[in-house]
Image (cartoon, rainbow, N blue to C red):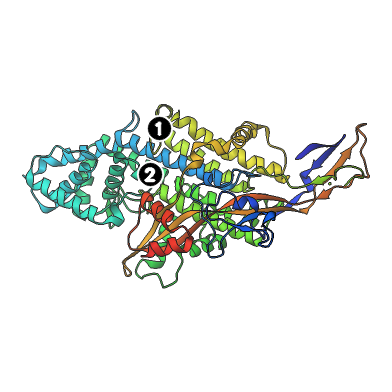
Amino acid sequence: MSRYVFDWGSDSVEVDLSTQVLELEVAEEESFFSLRGRKDLESRPVDPADPSLGSISVVPRQLAPHLYAKLSDISSFYAWAPAQAFAVKSKCFDDGLLATVELLVQKGTPRLPGKRGLVLDVWRALRPRWPEESSDELRGTLSFLQAALSLTGSPEESNKTLTLHAKRCRQAFEADTFKSKPLGFYTWNNALTALFKQGRLLQEELSPESAELLARMLTEDPSRLSTYQRHLGLMARLTNPLSKPAVHEAGLTHCFFPPSDSHEGRLVKQLFGEVSPPDGYSFVDDFIQRIRDGRIETTPGTHSGVYDYQIHALAPLLFPERTPESERLIVGPKYRAELEAQFRTLFALTRETQLKQLESLSAGGAPLVVAPRLSIEPLAEHYRRRAEAYRFLRHVLEESLGADVLAGARRTLPKGTQEESLWDELVWMEQLFRGAHVIVRQELGCGLIPEADLPAAMLTRRWLRDWRRDSDISADTRCVVPVYFDKERDLTKVVAVMGFLSITVEARFQQAPQVRVFGADGQERADAKPLLFPTRYNTLCPVAEEVYVRRVPDRKEFRELCDTHGSREAILSALRA
C-alpha cells in the first residue's frame, strides 16, 4: 500500500494513496517561475500615478512566448523533476554512447574486427584483379572502396587511373549534401565526421555487377564473410533491421552496408514512393495519428533494434489514457497537447542520434492541507520502456563487443570523454529510468515499490536530489533533423527542435486519498477534516515544428540562427529562407 506520514502540530497525519486519482492540466495563467530568468521582460509601474508602489516585470505584448535554449537557462525552481530532465540526460548519453561505439567498431575489438579493416581487406582481395581484368565494373568497385577508405585514411593505391576515379566518386558523393553532410554528434570532431561520410557512402546502392564482385570476395573467405555478417548484425540491432539486401543476399538492389528500416521510413515509402506530398501535409501529424489509432504498432518484434525500442518508449506520450497508470491519473486536454509536443521533440532527437544509420482545517491552528505530491513528471510507462530500451542496448553491445570492452571504454563527449566506464553508465541509465517508473507508480498510489526495484529507486532519488548539477542537463539540444527529401519540390522536410517553453501544470484530486489523523496519544481523531488543495508544478514543453528547407543546417548553424531570431515564427521564417 502506498502511503506517507507527516506531522501536523502535535498530531500525526497518515495519507493512504490507494484511493487517490489525480488530474493533470496546464494552468490557465503564466506562473512567476515560468517568467523567472527571461531577459526580454519589461519593467512597468504598478500605478503610473503612484511611483511609490514600485514596478513589476511583464512580457511585452509584441513578443511571442520565450524559447529557452537549455534547461539550465530556466528558473532553478522545480517542484518536480520534469520529464525533459530525463530526456536531455538520455539524449546526451545516447549521443556519447553511439559516438564511442562508432569509434570502437571502426577500429575493432578483440571480439569484433574493425569495420575499416574489413573494407580494406575486401579491397586488397579485389585489387590484384586489376589490370588483368580491367572491366568498368571492377574499376568502379575498386574506386568505390578506395573512396570510402580515403574518408577515414589513405589506402595503399599507386595506380593513377584508380586514384582518379576514386577521387571523382568521392567528390560526386560529397556534392550531394543531403547524403554527405554530417549532422548531430558527428560534427564533434574530425574522426566522427569522417565516420559519418564513410558510413553514408557505403550505404549507396550498387550495380548488380559490383554487388556480385563484392559478394564473391566475401564468400571466398569464411572468416571475412563471418566478420561482415557480424557487422551487419550489429547495425541491425544497434539501430534497426536493414532496409535493403546486403551484397551476398537475394534482392533487386544491394548495398555494401545497407541503411536501417524504421516506422517513419516505411510510411514515407508507402505514401510517397512515387508521388510528392500534397501541400500542407504534416508528416509528423500523420505519424502521430497512425500510432494513436493502431495503424502503426510500435511494440518491438523479434528482429527489432534499439531504435524500435526507443520509439516504443515515446508512444505512451500519445495515449496516456491507455497506460497502466491511467487508473490513477487523468490527463486534461491541454496537458495532453503538451505531451504530444514532447513526443514530437523526442522523436526528432531520437532520430538525430541514429541519423547516420537511418533511413487541511483545525480550530486554533494551521489548517490541515493535503495536496498531490509528485517528485517526477508522472509518465511511468514512458520511463519503463526507456529502461527496457537501455537493457536491450546493453545486451546487444555485450554480445557484439564484449563486456570487457565496454568496461574499458569511456563515453565520447563534445570535448574529451566521461570518467565512468561505458558499461557502468549503461547500467546506470537503465536503473535511472527503472527507478523513475517505480517512484511515479508509488506516488500515484499504484502500490509499494517492489523489493527488487528498491536499488533502482534509491539511485533515481539520489539523482533527483541534485539533478540540476548534472553536466548533461546544461546541454543545448536544439537541432534540425531531416525526415525526407521531396524530389519534386527540391526541398528537404525537417523537424526543427527550437528550445523549451516553461509552463505550469496543475495536479488536482479527482478522487481523494484516505486521510487519517492521530493525536499525541495515538488515538485517531474523527474531528480533523483535511482541505484538499491542488499542487502546481513548473515544467517544460519542448517546441518542435515541421518545415521545408533548401539547406539543412548543422547544430552550430541552427543554434546561431535561433539565437539571432529568438521567436518560433522568426526562426521558421529564417529556416524557410
Can you tell which mark lies on residue 185?
2
Q: Which residue is drawn at the image coordinates 33% and 33% (left, top)?
A: 112
| First-in-chain label (2 vs 1) | 2
> Which quadrant of the figure has residue 116?
top left
Eyeballing the image, is 104 above or below 332?
Answer: above
> Which quadrant of the figure has residue 416?
top left
Residue 40: percent from the left, percent from the top?
A: 53, 55
Q: Which residue is drawn at the image coordinates 86% and 41% (left, top)?
A: 516
Residue 192: percent from the left, percent from the top?
A: 32, 41
Q: Which residue is drawn at the image coordinates 38% and 44% (left, top)?
A: 185
The reply to whether residue 304 is in sight is: no
Residue 445: percent from the left, percent from the top?
A: 73, 44
Q: Amino acid at mark 2?
A: Phe
Of the pair 445 and 60, the residue shown nearer to us:
60
Q: Amino acid at mark 1?
A: Thr
Side of 226 where 158 appears, left or right: left
The reply to whether residue 289 is in sight is: yes
Of the pair 298 and 467, the residue shown nearer to us:
467
Disc 1 packing (10 Å; few <14; some 14–19; many ≥20): some
Side of 40 where 571 appears, left or right: left
Q: Which residue is drawn at the image coordinates 61% and 34% (left, top)?
A: 456
Can you tell which mark lies on residue 417?
1
Quarter containing the C terminus? bottom left
Side of 151 where 442 appears, left or right: right
